[in-house]
Image (cartoon, rainbow, N blue to C red):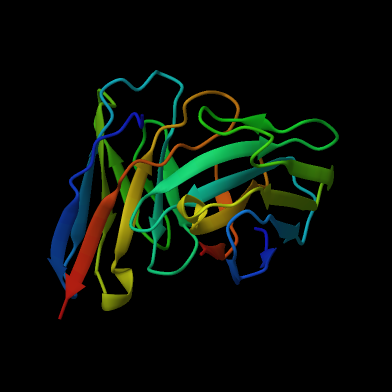
C-alpha cells in the first residue's frame, strides 16, 4: 500500500492556482516526497521533490509542513494542459523504488 | 535526463501466447524498473531490472510469468508469458538516471489480449 493519501479528484479554474494536498503522516525523517503527474495516454512525468524545505521549479512549488506529515503541490497558474492525474509518493526504502497510489485527478476547466 | 524508447507501442495478442517488450535508453543507467498500468488504474511496480543478475520482483509478480532481461546498462526486456485477457495493460519502463528518485518513463506498451 502507498504511504500517502490524496483526494481522488479536484477541479480548478484555468489561470487560477491549483493546490493539491497530500498526507504522509508516517514519513520518516530522511524520506523525500515526490510528485509526478500523468497526462492521459502518456507515461508519468516527474514534477518536483523535497525533504523538508519548500521547493520551487519551473513547473510547480512544493510546500511541506514543518512536521512533514503533509505537503501541497502548487501549480501557480493552471492551464488546460495541466489536466492530469497527480501522484504524491514517498519511497518505501533505499532501493529507489517508487510505489504509486491512486493519485488526484485534476481537471482544469475554462 | 533520459530518453526511453519502448517497442512495441501497442499489440494485440491471442491468449496463451507470449510477448516481449523492449526498453532502450539513450544513456547508461543503474536503476531500471518495469511497471504495469491496468485500465483505469494507477501504476503497479512489477520488478527492478538488475544488470547482470536476476530481476527483483514485487509481491504478486513471478519470474515465470514476467521474465526480465537486463544485458547491459541501456537495455532491458520484459516478457509477458502465457497471456490471458487479465494481462491487458500498459507496460511501462522507467529509469532513475542519478539515483535521486527522479524517474523517467517511456510512453508505454499497450497490450490487448483476446
**Furthest-bottom residue in this view:** A110
Residue A66 in the image, given as x and y percentages of width and height: 25, 27
Image side of residue B68 versus residue B60, left or right: right
Please tell me whether residue A65 is drawn above or below residue A28 in the rendered image.
Answer: below
The reply to whether residue B72 is visible in this rendering is no
Q: Nearer the viewer, residue A43 or B14?
A: B14
Q: Residue at coordinates 24% horizontally, 58% vertically from top-left?
A: A105
Question: Residue B13: x and y, percent?
Answer: 60, 65
* Position of the C terminus of chain A by quadrant: bottom left
Picture coordinates of residue A98 (x, y %)? 49, 37
| Residue positioned 75% across, 35% down in the render | B50
Q: Quadrant of residue A37?
A: bottom left
Question: Hey, which quadrant is residue A60 in on the image?
Answer: bottom left
**Is residue B84 found left or right of A55 in the rendered image?**
right
Viewer can see residue B12: yes
Could you say which quadrant of the image residue A17 lies in? bottom left
Q: Residue at the location (58% across, 57% down)?
A: B15
Q: Quadrant of the N terminus of chain A?
A: top left
Q: Point out residue A79 in the picture as x, y percentages from the top left corner.
A: 26, 75
Count numbered badges in the picture: 0
The residue lying toward the viewer, choosing from B48 and A19, is B48
At 47% from the left edge and 57% from the top edge, which residue is drawn? A44
Report the front residue among A55 and B104.
B104
Task: Specify whether A49 is left or right of A27.
Answer: right
Amino acid at each position: 500500500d502507498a504511504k500517502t493519501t490524496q483526494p481522488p479528484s479536484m477541479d480548478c479554474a484555468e489561470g487560477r492556482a491549483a493546490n493539491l494536498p497530500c498526507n504522509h503522516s508516517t514519513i520518516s525523517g530522511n524520506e523525500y516526497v515526490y510528485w509526478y503527474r500523468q497526462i492521459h495516454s502518456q507515461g508519468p512525468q516527474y514534477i518536483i521533490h523535497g525533504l523538508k524545505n519548500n521547493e520551487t521549479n519551473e513547473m510547480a512549488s512544493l510546500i511541506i509542513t514543518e512536521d512533514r506529515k503533509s505537503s501541497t503541490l502548487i501549480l501557480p497558474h493552471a492551464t488546460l494542459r495541466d489536466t492530469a492525474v497527480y501522484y504524491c509518493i514517498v519511497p518505501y526504502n533505499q532501493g529507489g523504488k517508487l510505489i504509486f497510489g491512486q493519485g488526484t485527478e485534476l481537471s482544469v476547466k475554462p | 535526463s533520459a530518453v526511453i524508447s519502448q517497442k512495441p507501442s501497442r499489440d494485440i495478442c491471442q491468449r496463451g501466447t507470449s510477448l516481449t517488450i523492449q526498453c532502450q535508453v539513450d544513456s547508461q543507467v543503474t536503476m531500471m524498473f518495469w511497471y504495469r498500468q491496468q485500465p483505469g488504474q494507477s501504476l503497479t511496480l512489477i520488478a527492478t531490472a538488475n544488470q547482470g543478475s536476476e530481476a527483483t520482483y514485487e509481491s504478486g509478480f513471478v519470474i515465470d510469468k514476467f521474465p526480465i532481461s537486463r544485458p547491459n546498462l541501456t537495455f532491458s526486456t520484459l516478457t509477458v508469458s502465457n497471456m490471458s485477457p487479465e494481462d491487458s495493460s500498459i507496460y511501462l519502463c522507467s529509469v532513475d538516471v542519478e539515483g535521486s528518485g527522479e524517474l523517467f518513463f517511456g510512453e508505454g506498451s499497450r497490450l490487448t489480449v483476446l
